[in-house]
Amino acid sequence: MRVITNRRLLEFAELYTGASEPLQAWRKVMEAGIYGNFAELRQVFRGVDKVGNLHVFNIAGNKYRLVAYLHFERQLCYIKHVLTHVEYDKEGWKK
């Protein structure tokens, strides 16, 4: 699956020390896989949940949350938000 765009991960990692390695590890696993649906995605990423039409990934032991829109047919992952757990809990990302 192709991740659009790594820039969001890099920008987040500049702000939060220690975020780069787990975010890039997530990206590499995501890009190495082909996922036909949520069930197949969940087999690889146990810490992923579906919220509406978005997918929320737990990163670095739930320290960070990555919110993405996945287009399974086209094998595209659009990163919408990368947040700390506290930022995620404020629910501003749902707007």
Image (tube, grey):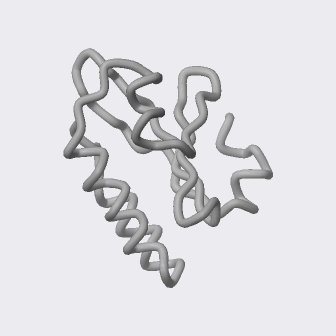
Q: Residue furthest top?
A: 73
Q: Residue at x 50, y 84 (%)?
A: 17
Q: Nearer the viewer, residue 90 or 48?
A: 48
Percent across and percent down for residue 10 are 35, 68
Q: Residue at x 57, y 40 (%)?
A: 56
Q: Is residue 75 above or below residue 57?
A: above
Percent across and percent down for residue 53 are 55, 21
Q: Is residue 87 above or below residue 31?
A: below
Q: Is residue 31 above or below residue 6?
A: above
Q: Residue furthest right?
A: 90
Q: Is residue 13 above or below residue 61?
A: below
**Quadrant of the snapshot with the N terminus:** top left
Percent across and percent down for residue 48 are 55, 40
Quick check: 19 left or right of 21? right
Q: Residue at x 64, y 28 (%)?
A: 51
Q: Nearer the viewer, residue 40 or 81?
A: 40
Quick check: 4 left or right of 68? left
Q: Residue at x 32, y 64 (%)?
A: 24
Quick check: 87 left or right of 44? right
**Quadrant of the snapshot with the C terminus:** top right
Q: Residue furthest front?
A: 43
